Image (spheres, rainbow, N blue to C red):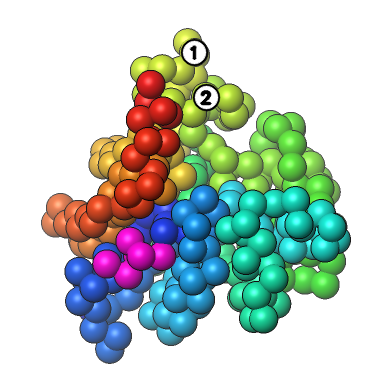
Amino acid sequence: MTTYAIGDVQGCYEALQRLLDTLKLDPARDRLWFCGDLVNRGGESLETLRLIKSLSDISTVVLGNHDLALLSIAERTPEEQNKVNIDLRRVLQAPDSKELIDWLRQRQLLHADPDLGWMMIHAGLSPKWTLKVAQACAREIEERLRGRNAFKLLRSMYGDQPIWAPNLAGIERQRAIINVFTRLRYCSPSGRIAFEEKGAPGSQKPGLYPWFSVPGHVPRELNIVCGHWSTLGLFQGLGVHAIDTGCVWGGPLTALELTPRDVPPRVIQVSGRAEGLAELHARRA
């Protein structure tokens, strides 16, 4: 059996189709992991969600910040929903919108396969989180999202405070967990997230580190595959494989074959959204 992880699609349906064609999947043997941010900006979020949902029997998805944003917007009034971009409005106004949103709410924040030797998250892990702690934190949020009162979490999850601490409770704890899993790029050794820092390593302020290279972080029990950080590009080191290569901005869409520890993972890429090239150049200027 072969397992492929796929980086942030962000509504780039046509690129995803080409990547899947390139992989030549065998549904009887192969599996797909999606690193989150399935939707937004690419112009075909509705088609992307439908396609990935249709692959549910062979795929695992973790939620990204854009996916959570869509879930949050789905809880708003129709008047408020009409103010979001057309890409997300097409999802919210589709005849199968409820089915798609309900399916998305059932996805995970962390997926681990010890037998395979890999785990998947969208953004990052707090420096002191062991796998056991991270799994427990993920379950807290997943259970809330799947429950009857998910709207309470989705309406109050936004904010940059507080910093994660084990003794947090209630919505502050839930917000801190979500921020780590879906928004983390740089942080201090204490785990304080620098939300304003989004550039490539070397551009950050002194005292901040990419989450995967913070001094004193706990040992990595499994290889990690993640997305979220398009300006980082393809990164493989320190047991971390970051594969958001900016498809929506004109970069490639990346898949990674998840191989055993002693076998280098194979990278497979297709060209991304052509319309995103000008935006990519503007972001890097």
Q: Residue at x 74, y 36 (%)?
A: 159
Give the label on residue 88, or none. none
Residue type beneath disc 1: Lys
Q: Position of residue 97 (x, y in %)?
A: 67, 75
Q: Secondary structure at mark 2?
A: loop
Looking at the rendered image, the quarter that the C terminus falls into is: top left
For the N terminus, the quadrant is bottom left
158 on left or right of 8: right
Q: Which residues are magenta?
A: 13-18
Q: Which mark is residue 205?
A: 1
Left or right of 73? Residue 64 is left
The residue tagged 2 is: 197
Residue 14 is covered by the magenta coloring: yes
Q: Report the residue that reaches farthest toward the bottom.
A: 28
Q: Residues within 10 Å of mark 1 (few under 14, many from 20)?
A: few
Q: Give x and y (percent) for residue 40.
A: 55, 54
Q: Give whichever of 27, 111 is nearer the camera.
A: 27
Which residue sits at x=59%, y=49%? Answer: 65
Please name the residue shown 65% across and 47% down the image.
Answer: 178
Is residue 13 or residue 169 the one in the foreground? 13
